[in-house]
Amino acid sequence: MRAAAFAEYLDRLFDIGTGHLGWTAAETLDTNLDHIRRAADARHELISSVLKAVFPPAPTPPGGDGVAGKLMRFASSHNGMIAARAASETT
């Protein structure tokens, strides 16, 4: 790892410790680098679980969220129009 990239990594960990985790500069500088990362991961897990408890994820629509699922939902919601148009084009 080049020195500039490592310096950016250290700056980022310092920002996480003092910003995201709310530690003082002295606490952050006295903490092992791996412990800062692990504490940030744990904080992220905590916030995610609280948000999921307050705002449960929406149910997955039939056919999934991909293109195939969207096309299936479109076709099923417009089935009458599609059938009518196809019938009018054959006459």
Image (tube, rainbow, N blue to C red):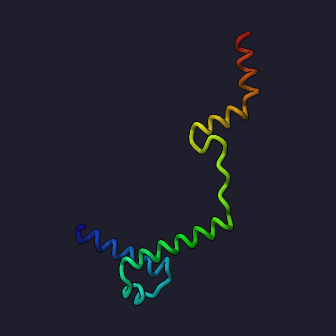
Q: Residue at x 63, y 65 (%)?
A: 52
Residue closest to the eye, 4 or 54:
54
Rendered location of residue 79, percent (x, y): 73, 28
Rendered location of residue 63, percent (x, y): 63, 40
User: Which corner quadrant of the image does residue 70 belong to?
Assistant: top right
Q: Residue at x 61, y 39 (%)?
A: 69
Above-or-below relation of 21 to 78: below
Residue sticking out furthest to the left = 2
Rendered location of residue 83, percent (x, y): 73, 22
* Residue 34 relative to residue 59: left or right: left
Question: Which quadrant holds the N terminus?
Answer: bottom left
Rendered location of residue 35, percent (x, y): 40, 79
Query: Exactly how many numbered labels are in the figure?
Result: 0
Question: Which quadrant holds the C terminus?
Answer: top right
Q: Residue at x 29, y 74 (%)?
A: 7
Above-or-below relation of 78 to 19: above
Q: Residue at x 74, y 15 (%)?
A: 88
Residue sticking out furthest to the top = 91
Above-or-below relation of 24 to 60: below
Residue sticking out furthest to the bottom = 26
* Residue 82 relative to residue 6: left or right: right
User: Which corner quadrant of the image does residue 62 belong to?
Assistant: top right
* Residue 80 relative to residue 40: left or right: right
